[in-house]
Amino acid sequence: MSTTTPQNTGNLTVTTPSDREIVMTRAFDAPRILVFDAWTRPELIKQWMGPLVWSLTTAEIDLKVGGAYRFVGRGANGPDMGWGGVYREVVAPERLVASERFDQPWYPGEAQVSPELTEQGGKTTLKATVRYESREARDGVLKTGMTRGISESYDRLAELLASTPARKSA
């Protein structure tokens, strides 16, 4: 059953508006161009993506429609986790749409990840929608520590943005 009742994890709100979607929303005290850069520049993504016990060892991005991305994360006690996909839509600095598939799948099939950025008064709201191939895949993901890991990752992103010199909003 889908729910639109938000689950709050720190500054992150998680909802399930349909049987196949998870929507994660978080506000950042930064212009959206900085948040977009942090999502699309490998040297920045390596500084924030993943939970606290992780480091992102590989971040490759070909930011264009049809371009691929590849990430590899390393946990404190676990094996490397690799994933990647193809960009289906790139509208800088407001929206990305990309496929997502893990090297060692922990949910069936492929997902579509769509971060959208809106800015008001120098603050940016990130709404990341992940659409899975099935309700079972979505529910399986919800049963993992994904929500905590995303929350920690976005906390790391907020710290990075706070230490980044401001650029004009786009």
Image: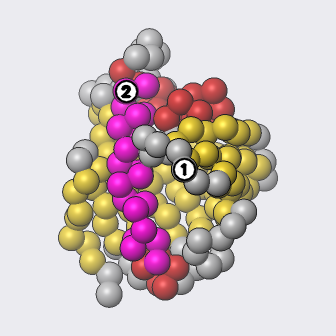
Say what secondary structure mark 1 lies in.
Answer: loop
How far across and how far down the image is residue 135, in percent? 47, 84
Q: Can residue 127 be seen in this view?
A: no
Outermost residue toward the front? Answer: 77
Question: Residue furthest toward the top?
Answer: 165
Residue under numbered circle 2: 159
Residue pictured at 46% horizontal, 71% vertical:
141
135, 129: nearer the viewer: 135
Q: Is residue 148 magenta?
A: yes
Residue 78, relative to residue 1: is it above or below?
A: above
Q: Where is residue 99 in the image (x, y as percent from the top left)?
A: 66, 61
Disc ID at residue 64 = none
Residue type at tag 1: Asn
63 falls in the magenta region: no
Of 66 and 83, nearer the camera is 83
- Rendered location of residue 114, percent (x, y): 53, 56
Secondary structure, magenta segment, majority class: helix
Quarter of the image for residue 17 reads: bottom left
Mark 1 crowd level (few <14, some 14–19, many ≥20, 10 Å Cα) = few
Q: Is mark 2 on a helix, strand or loop?
A: helix
Answer whether residue 158 is visible to the viewer in this image: yes
Residue at (59% x, 71% y) in the render: 106
Q: Residue at x 67, y 47 (%)?
A: 72
Q: Residue 77 carries which label?
A: 1
**Left or right of 136: which side holds 92?**
right
Identity of the residue drawn at 36% across and 21% down: 162
Q: What range is drawn magenta here?
A: 140-160
Q: Is residue 75 above or below residue 147?
A: above
Would residue 104 be found to the left or right of residue 28 on screen? right
